[in-house]
Image (spheres, coloured by chain):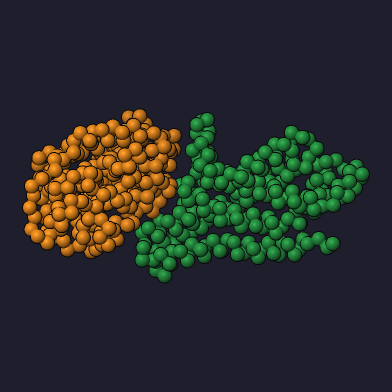
Chain colours: A green, B orange
Amino acid sequence: MSFLADNFTLLRDAFLTTLALAVVSGICALVLGTLLTAMRVSPVKPLRGAAVFYVEVFRNTPLTVVFFFLAFGIVEIDLQFPTRFITAVAALSLYTAAFVSEALRSGINSVPPGQAEAARALGLDFRQTLTSVVLPQAFRTVVPPLGNVWIALAKNTSIAAGFAVTELAAALVRLTNQNADQLLVVFLAIVAAYLVITLPSAWLIGVIERRTAILR
Amino acid sequence: MRITRYAAAAAAAGLLLAGCASEAGNQAEDAAENTAEVETDVEFDAGTTMAELNEAGAITVGTKFDQPGFGLLNPQTREPEGFDVEIAKIIAAKLGIDADDITWTETVSANREPFIQNGQVDIVVATYTINDTRKQVVDFAGPYYEAGQDIMVAKGNPEGIEGPDDLAGKTVCSVEGSTPAQNIREKYPEAQLTTYDVYSKCADDLKNGNVQAVTTDNVILTGLIAGSPDDFELVGSPFTEEPYGIGLMKGDDDFRSFINDVLEESFEDGSWADAWDRTAGSVSGQEAPEPPSVDRY
């Protein structure tokens, strides 16, 4: 136990970094993903095409490749993120947004077409139809898949360890290399730290799911 | 050091992709011209490892296949090349074994001790740092080379970094969990340390200006520099000591003394320096250092 106390600062900072990566990227991905979904159901063809292109590119590219491109690839065109943390947030957000968008699209498809038709009949324009009629219903049905995306994101933050962000996986590597006699303790501490993020999330998702359930 | 070596492997792979195959090709030609002269008329006391190996006319040597300058597999000849390889050839020659009769086995950091203990290799010459933990399970002849943690900077050394003390306030890159990274954390806390999982990323970051220095064993840095000699240079003032020894079966004191004799002879007759110039020296552009003194513990 004294071993954990000795490395408390490292573990705490690593935990907070992982949490910050997940939360900031999660918010960005939700915003971007919603925007992408709106583009996909919009009446403007080029917008639909752009959104489909984006989703297919990021959904089918390994996250490590996205990281590598943002960390070392864009330098070739004289672009760079100010810090490695922001690079990681950008990679995680861009990648996760594709999955958020797909989840939301399935939600929108589950809203009966009559809802949108009725909204249009009442004189609402496309934006109003989407934001006040379709999306609120879509979000309710996609709470479970979005929860999945969130938990996957929380774990995907570990890729940042390979890109100069000292989060939990980086702390795991550092501590196990220096304390070969404490492998189990280090491992359990890191797993526990991830569970602290994901288990309450799973519980919260369950609560939201029940609160927002549509009675059909 | 385990992580360091893996990272070196990855770095080496990157270097291969970057196209240093021509370098390896040149090395191969040089090596072919200059192999140590094989002793034809040698006698060893019966029952010793030397007698057994001489009798068999063959030896199995464990070396790295991914360390430019020390032990790097030449994809064309399927044989490793480098300083470690040349040292092994010198020892084999003194045993009366032709270089063609050496069986090369790839050893990585994690399997060197078991390979020696199980007799899968007769000796290991594989950037193998002598330390007390390892001495518990294997014995070491040598050292035949003294490596150390060094610093790599951008060509021309724009930041004027001459040693680890100059790293204060500078960004320096290494690999997470490696001994060199820990060294910087503990002894030079004023340096801003960035850690990746492999050294090739550090090299990329140095190239694009995100970090001002990269630090690890000079041997690994040399390999990185060989890949892009126009971008990087070595500071060349090692600040830790990593004596490389030749690993052999624990308790085989006769064999250990024999290898130590061979090494000392090679230090004196110039074959050691010659081997350096043809391998690691040609990769790094550095002249052969003073040979270390053999530690007959």
Q: Which residue is painted at 39% across and 68% down in the image?
A: A2
Residue at 15% x, 54% y is B55
- Residue sitting nearer the eye, B287 or A189: B287
> Foreground residue, A103 or B183?
A103
> Can residue B239 be seen by looking at this rendering?
no
Q: Residue B132 at what x, y percent from top left?
A: 23, 60
Q: Nearer the viewer, residue A168 or A106?
A: A106
Query: Does the image show residue B41?
Result: yes
Q: Position of residue A148 (x, y in %)?
A: 65, 57
Residue at position x 43%, y 48% from top? Answer: B197
Kindly give the residue lying farthest to the bottom in the view shown: A1
How many marks do you count on the picture? 0
Quadrant into which the N terminus of chain A falls: bottom left
Left or right, A150 with reference to B14: right
Indicate left or right for B150 with A57 as reference.
left
Q: Residue furthest front?
A: B56
Image point (86%, 49%), residue name: A113
Provide residue B41's location: percent of width, then percent of height.
8, 47
Across and down, in percent, residue B296 comes to: 12, 56
**A54 relative to A116 in the view: left or right:** left
